[in-house]
Amino acid sequence: MSIDELTVVADHLIRLARLEFEGRSEAHATWEELADMLDRHKGTPGIRKARLAREQARIGADSAPETRLRLALDRAGLPEAQLNVATMLSSGVVRQPDLAYPEYRVAVEYEGEGHSGPAQIVRDIAREEDFALACWVLVRISRRHMENDAKAAVRKVRAALRANGWHPTG
């Protein structure tokens, strides 16, 4: 497995479970448990890659595409996003975008297969309206944007960040 695919696994292991969706509320492992496991397996083939993956891992990604998107944005030099953090948009309106840049009022949603049903489309439109009313930019990413090393996804997120005041350093 590549380091990125190992990072997808690590993100899954340490992600915060949601009782309402999964019937559990505990992560499969903690950050420390991953480190301990890696320390116990010194010299095992692939352990260096696994350690690099742990360094890239973050708590908060809810899916493999979200992790892959985060890694592509990080590699492109964009700021590190907050992952699935409750974001107060206005009085009583809280949304939890897949990735968020609160300082720039930019949210990013990866929309996979589960976003194609009629009821989900209605919810997605309402979500987009909530962000717009709070003067946030919502960047919607699909599988198509992830092709070719996620260049289209990076381009969309970079443009939204720049439009909202972010300037690359260096």
Image (tube, rainbow, N blue to C red):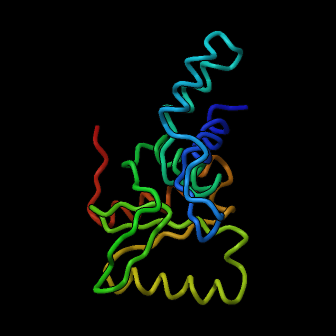
* Identity of the residue drawn at 29% across and 57% down: 166
Image coordinates of residue 104 in percent, x first then y, are 30, 63
The image quadrant of residue 117 is bottom right
Residue farthest to the top, as pictured: 43
Q: Nearer the viewer, residue 26 or 168?
A: 26
**Horizontal arrangement in the rendering, residue 95 relative to residue 102 (left or right):** right
Q: Is residue 28 above or below residue 106?
A: above
- Residue at image location 46% in from the left, 60% down from the top: 99
- Please give the count of numbered marks on the rendered protein: 0
Query: Is 113 placed above or below 40 here?
Result: below
- Give the residue at x 53% y 24%: 36
Q: Quadrant of the N terminus?
A: top right
Using residue 130 as the reference point, say whether residue 109 is left or right of it.
right
Is the residue 27 above or below the residue 86 in the image?
Answer: above
User: Which quarter of the figure has residue 96?
Assistant: bottom left
Above or below for 110 versus 46: below
75 horizontally vs 166: left or right? right
Quarter of the figure that contains the C terminus: top left
| Residue closest to the eye, 16 or 115 | 16
- Where is residue 76 shown, x and y percent of the image? 47, 44
Residue 8 spot, x, y in % from top left = 63, 44
Which x, y percent locates residue 154?
Answer: 51, 54
